[in-house]
Amino acid sequence: MDKKKAEVYKRRLIEKREDLLRLVSKSDHDGREADEEVTQDLADKAANSYTKEFLFHQSDDNRRILHLVNEALGRLENGTYGLCVACHEDVQVKRLEAVPWARHCIECQEKQEQGLL
Ligand SMILES: [Zn+2]
C-alpha cells in the first residue's frame, strides 16, 4: 500500500479510535448513573437492569472494535496494513473502505464466520 493511502486510513482509524474512546467512557459513566438511581418499584428495577445490560453490551462491542482499531494502527506502523492476517493476501479495497480495521480479506472473513478458520 502506498504511503498516501496509508495516511488516509490512518487518519480514519485515529478518528474512529477517538469516537470509540468517547463512547466507551460515556457508557461507563451512564452505567454508573443507572446504578446510583434508587429504584423501589420492581418495574423500575427491571428497566434499570435492562438499561445496564444494554449499555454493557454496547460498550463491549465498542471495546472489541477499539481493540481491532488499535491492532490496525499497529499494522500500519509495521507495514502489514491492508494484508489479510490469515492468508497474507491484499484485503479488498472495498472492504477496507467499509471496515478500515478489517483483519481478514472477504474470503477469510467468510471462512471465519463459518468457523472454518
Ligand atoms: Zn485472507
Image (tube, rainbow, N blue to C red):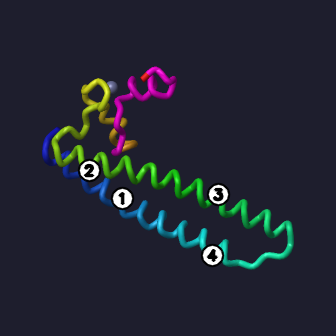
Residue at 53%, 58% in the rendered image: 59
Residue furthest toward the left? Answer: 3
Q: CA distance from mark 1 to mark 3?
A: 21 Å
Query: Which x, y percent locates residue 42?
Result: 86, 68
| Viewer-closest of 69 and 46 | 46
Earlier in the chain: of badge 4 and badge 1, it is 1
Q: Which mark is residue 33?
A: 4
> Which amino acid lies under the numbered mark 4 shown in the image of this protein?
Glu
Q: Is residue 110 magenta?
A: yes
Q: Are marks 4 and 2 in contact (CB under 8 Å)?
A: no
Query: Which x, y percent locates residue 55?
Result: 61, 61
Q: CA distance from mark 4 to mark 3?
A: 14 Å
Give the labeled residue for mark 3.
Answer: 54
> Which amino acid lies under the numbered mark 2 shown in the image of this protein?
Leu
Q: Which mark is residue 73?
A: 2
Q: Are marks 4 and 3 in contact (CB under 8 Å)?
A: no
Which quadrant of the figure contains the N terminus?
top left
